[in-house]
């Protein structure tokens, strides 16, 4: 699968896609299907290039959580569409529809209640429990050792769940190749050629030579800021704030580091009381967090974690809130990426905190920190937009940029909508994610969650 490129790249292609992650490959697959269906071409018109390999970026290290729980209506509707795509071929996508739970403190109660109401309105199946006593009862009905404090609402999404990161991306690549799409790895895009009469891109300049192209789709994940610079798009932008005032000179990109890891317990131990695979658990709480090692106070501020049993990782895998990389994005060392990075992987502080969070939530995880998988380094960078929501838009007339602001492994369906737009049909679901929203002040509402992606 995927062609490692020693020789030359094609002289020209109709559609050039940069990046063999979830977005590049989903777009390739769906575009190929639509070209065939409409008699306007086929997968053979599409070339995907990746500088490293299939699933070499964020898609290959994602925790793999697929959920609908978003405070922003536009995000929720988009996620519902993506869940349908996951459900269309669970085997190929290594998708486990175990459901998802958002377990929250009082300061998030109202936000989550509105999510529940809107899930009902769009027909997304979920259950909402309110009040500390009822929440505790519901949770102990699932896990008899449940002990998280400060919880006053539980949103239990019956759809969604998680998928195995690399398996699903390989599944996607297989499906795209079966449609005739060509995937070439070891081909790095280093620049673009622009038309003399227009700003459109006429060719990619790659490490293996020039590729002329009619249309470009960018699915470069954490490297999007690099491609953005090559396209000579603005590094600093103006944003109309909620206060109605223009805020000039705001950086277009900012990196955050995601912290994740695996507790090397038997994944079976996290099953529910009736022996089933549990939903993905996400807990936010303002209850004080104490060390599971020495009982010292770790934080008395709002904190959150997520976790799931994972047979691929061999344990219970998950993470906690990311941190901002307070640096000019052009100077952030994105390569080597993920677990290979010397700078952006988890350290002892994360391990101590996350294991203490697990123990705070369920007694079965108390005293288990020594089982943490220290040798398997995890975590990695995400490239975020100024409001931490995606930008899906066309630049320079023929370049479709898919910049998901790190929301995106779950967004398998975005490639289908992008393909539809490339074919000339606008998508109402993508409309709230245009670049012009910054200047127009059409920003998404923000929630009280401690995570930048809720
Ligand atoms: C630790 C971590 C956990 C996460 N967990 C979740 C989760 O549970 N659920 C969720 O929904 N999202 C999660 N995310 C976010 C999600 O992984 C990303 O939003 C998504 O995978 C991005 O997909 P992509 O296709 O845009 O980019 P990627 O998967 O990063 O793919 C981009 C590809 O582009 C290639 N590339 C880059 N530059 C060039 C170039 N110049 N020339 C050629 N090729 C190039 C790279 O080699 C790479 O393979 C997580 C992210 C991280 C870092």
Image: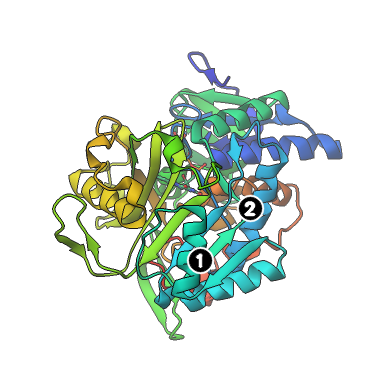
Q: Is residue 446 left or right of residue 332?
A: right
Q: Residue 154 carries which label?
A: 1
Q: Which of 276 and 228 is in front in this view?
A: 276
Q: What element carries label 1?
A: strand
* Quadrant of residue 14 within the rendered picture: top right
Circles 1 and 2 in contact, beta carbons < 8 Å: no
Q: Is residue 222 left or right of residue 407?
A: left
Q: Can residue 311 be seen in this view?
A: yes
- CA gap, disc 1 and disc 2: 15 Å
Q: Is mark 1 within 8 Å of ligand 1?
A: no
Is residue 298 depicted above or below 413 in this figure? below
First in sequence: mark 1 or mark 2? 1
Residue at the spot 47% in from the left edge and 58% down from the top edge? 140
Q: Where is residue 13 in the image (x, y as percent from the top left)?
A: 65, 30
Q: Nearer the viewer, residue 243 or 407?
A: 407
Q: Which mark is residue 159?
A: 2
Residue at the spot 71% in from the left edge and 66% down from the top edge? 122
Q: Position of residue 114 (x, y in %)?
A: 57, 75
Q: Where is residue 307 in the image (x, y as percent from the top left)?
A: 42, 48
Q: Is residue 351 left or right of residue 319?
A: left
Image quadrant containing the N terminus = top right
Residue at the spot 86% in from the left edge and 36% down from the top edge? 39
Is residue 212 depicted above or below 127 in this figure? above
């Amino acid at each position: 699968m995927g062609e490692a490129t020693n020789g030359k790249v094609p002289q020209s292609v109709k559609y050039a896609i940069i990046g063999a992650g979830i977005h590049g490959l989903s777009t390739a697959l769906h575009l190929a299907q639509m070209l065939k269906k409409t008699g306007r071409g086929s997968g053979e018109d599409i070339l995907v290039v990746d500088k490293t390999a299939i699933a070499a970026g964020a898609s290959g290290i994602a925790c793999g959580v697929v959920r609908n729980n978003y405070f922003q209506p536009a995000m929720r509707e988009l996620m519902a569409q993506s869940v349908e795509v996951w459900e269309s071929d669970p085997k190929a996508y290594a998708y486990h529809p175990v459901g998802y739970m958002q377990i929250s403190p009082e300061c998030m109660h109202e936000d989550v209640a509105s999510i529940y109401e809107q899930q009902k309105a769009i027909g997304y199946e979920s259950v909402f429990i309110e009040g500390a006593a009822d929440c505790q009862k519901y949770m102990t009905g699932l896990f008899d050792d449940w002990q998280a404090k400060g919880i006053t609402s539980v949103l239990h999404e019956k759809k969604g769940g998680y998928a195995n990161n690399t398996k699903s991306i390989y599944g996607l690549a297989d499906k795209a190749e079966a449609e005739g799409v060509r995937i070439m790895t070891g081909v790095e895009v280093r620049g673009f050629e622009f038309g003399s009469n227009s700003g459109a891109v006429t060719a990619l300049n790659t490490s293996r030579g020039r590729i002329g192209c009619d249309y470009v789709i960018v699915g470069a994940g954490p490297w999007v800021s690099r491609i953005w610079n090559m396209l000579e798009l603005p590094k600093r932008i103006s944003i109309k704030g909620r206060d109605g005032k223009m805020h000039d000179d705001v950086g277009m990109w900012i990196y955050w580091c995601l912290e994740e890891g695996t507790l090397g317990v038997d994944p079976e131990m996290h099953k529910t009381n009736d022996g089933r695979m549990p939903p993905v658990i996400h807990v936010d709480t303002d209850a004080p967090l104490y060390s599971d090692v020495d009982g010292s106070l770790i934080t008395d501020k709002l904190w959150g974690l997520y976790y799931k049993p994972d047979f691929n990782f061999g344990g219970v895998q998950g993470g906690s809130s990311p941190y901002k990389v307070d640096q000019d994005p052009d100077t952030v060392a994105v390569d080597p990426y993920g677990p290979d990075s010397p700078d952006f992987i988890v350290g002892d502080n994360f391990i101590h905190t996350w294991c203490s969070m697990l123990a705070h939530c369920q007694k079965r995880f108390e005293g288990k920190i020594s089982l943490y998988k220290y040798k398997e380094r995890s975590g990695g960078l995400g490239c975020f937009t100024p409001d931490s929501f995606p930008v899906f838009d066309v630049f320079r007339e023929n370049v479709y940029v898919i910049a998901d602001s790190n929301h995106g492994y779950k967004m398998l369906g975005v490639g289908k909508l992008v393909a539809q737009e490339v074919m000339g049909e606008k998508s109402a679901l993508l409309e709230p994610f245009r670049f012009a929203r910054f200047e127009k002040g059409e920003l998404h509402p923000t929630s009280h969650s401690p995570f930048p992606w809720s």
